[in-house]
Image: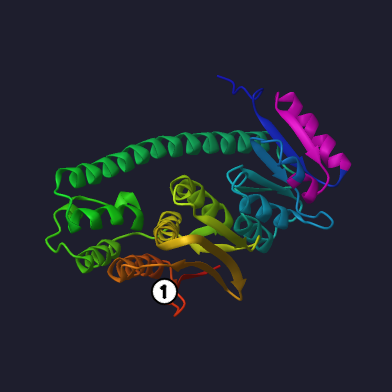
């Protein structure tokens, strides 16, 4: 049965017009929809409003070559999953290695065999479609598991007398990724803040860290948007100063948990004003959360900071709490870029 290419769009990136015409004619015969451009920057501009199913990328282009363009496509969360096939006269082992390391899925050398190129495009589109469907299924399963863990924890707390242990368990829901919560926590015999810290240390020993480059601004915005409605009732105001280029190499779930933990707690302590600053210094991103406090439960503060430190340490980072004589409380998160 013939493959239906009529629903597939291919972006051709090549600065040589005759090459573009040749490839466009070949793809048009196979019923592909084709978009073309003559530069890497123009390709990136197109990708802001078009989502092709595959990209054919030349290497030798002025200003931004194919390697650089491929890296830029992979660095953007909105485009990083688009299959990229490098189509170039360069065919040395070094060129092929650099292309694959830049993020290309395949490397086809010119002159190419038409049937092979068509089958490569079809194969990469099929692989990308299957991968997306698999990820969507995994996300559904993961969301269901997270919901179950949340309900299990809330049900446990609701069934207990509202003692210190119940309060501490509620704190934990904001301190660690909810998927880490299991029956070991609910059966913990040490009902103290130190007991929860010890549980976190044990739980993190078997956690597989999946570090990726993450935008600090995007994650902070998400976390703050979730917390803002609750803090608005208390009249908390926000002073946010973020470096537009701030990013970290971190596990998304752990990083989000550290931010949620410390920002939510700063809001609880705050007398009305919470400051969040993010800056880049050398190879480190420095995130500072500060507020002035009227009163502070130092045991809870120490527990939250210890748990945040445990999570940050798994990502080769650190967390520090500093208290000033004027009532200022400052949480500092340091992570590698």
Q: Nearer the viewer, residue 23 or 277?
A: 277
Q: Quadrant of the C terminus?
A: bottom right
Answer with the quarter of the image where residue 306 lies: bottom left
Decide whether the magenta segment is chiefly helix, strand or loop. Answer: helix
Query: What residue do we see at 21% from left, 41% from top?
Result: 155
**Of 16 and 275, the residue lying toward us:** 275
Hey, which residue is sitting farthest right in the picture? 17
Residue 21: x %, y % from top left: 84, 35
Q: Could one spot residue 215 in this view of the protein? A: no
Image side of residue 73 versus residue 234, left or right: right
Residue toward you, 319 or 289: 289
Q: Which residue is mark 1?
A: 321
Q: Give neighbour class at mark 1: few <14, some 14-19, many 20+ (Cα, 10 Å).
A: some
Residue that lies at the very extreme toward the left in this rendered image: 189
The x and y percentages for residue 335 are: 49, 69
- Judged from the image, the secondary structure of the residue bearing numbered disc 1 is strand
20 is higher (above) or lower (below) than 329: above
Residue 82 showing in the rendered view: yes
Q: Position of residue 261 (x, y in %)?
A: 39, 59
Q: Is residue 161 left or right of residue 199?
A: left
Q: Residue at x 66, y 22 (%)?
A: 6
Circle count: 1
Horizontal side of residue 200 vs 103, given as left or right = left
Estimate the x, y position of residue 186 in percent, counting from the top left. Answer: 17, 52
Residue nearest the viewer, comparing 272 with 216: 272
Q: Is the residue 320 above or below the residue 213 in the image?
A: below
Which quarter of the rendering shows the N terminus?
A: top right
User: Which stretch appears magenta?
Assistant: 17-44
Asked if residue 20 is among those painted magenta in the image, a careful observer would answer yes
Residue drawn at point x = 20 percent, y = 47 percent: 157
């Amino acid at each position: 049965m013939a493959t239906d290419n009529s629903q597939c769009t291919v972006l051709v990136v090549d600065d040589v017009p005759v090459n573009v015409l040749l490839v466009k004619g070949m793809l048009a015969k196979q019923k592909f929809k084709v978009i073309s451009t003559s530069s890497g920057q123009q390709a990136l501009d197109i990708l802001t409003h078009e989502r092709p199913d595959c990209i054919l990328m030349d290497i030798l282009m002025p200003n931004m070559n194919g390697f650089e363009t491929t890296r830029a496509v992979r660095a953007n969360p909105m485009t990083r999953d688009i299959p990229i096939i490098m189509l170039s006269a360069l065919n040395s082992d070094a060129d092929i290695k650099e292309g694959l390391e830049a993020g290309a899925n395949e490397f086809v050398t010119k002159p190419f065999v038409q049937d092979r190129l068509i089958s490569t495009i079809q194969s990469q589109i099929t692989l990308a479609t299957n991968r997306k469907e698999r990820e969507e299924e995994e996300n559904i399963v993961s969301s269901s598991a997270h919901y179950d863990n949340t309900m299990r924890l809330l049900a446990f707390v609701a069934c207990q007398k509202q003692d210190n242990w119940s309060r501490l368990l509620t704190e934990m829901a904001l301190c660690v990724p909810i998927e880490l919560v299991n029956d070991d926590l609910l059966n913990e015999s040490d009902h103290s803040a130190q007991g929860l810290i010890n549980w976190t240390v044990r739980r993190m020993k078997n956690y597989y860290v999946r570090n990726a480059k993450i935008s600090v601004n995007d994650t902070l915005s998400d976390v703050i948007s979730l917390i803002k409605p609750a803090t608005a009732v208390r009249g908390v105001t926000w002073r946010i100063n973020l470096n537009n280029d701030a990013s970290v190499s971190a596990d998304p779930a752990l990083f989000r948990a550290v931010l949620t933990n410390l920002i939510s707690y700063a809001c609880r302590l705050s007398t009305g004003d919470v400051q969040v600053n993010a800056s880049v210094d050398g190879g480190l991103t420095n995130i500072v959360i500060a507020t002035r406090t009227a009163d502070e439960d130092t045991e809870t503060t120490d527990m939250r900071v210890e748990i945040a430190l445990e999570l940050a340490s798994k990502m080769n980072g650190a967390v520090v709490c500093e208290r000033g004589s004027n009532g200022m409380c400052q949480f500092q998160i340091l992570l590698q870029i």
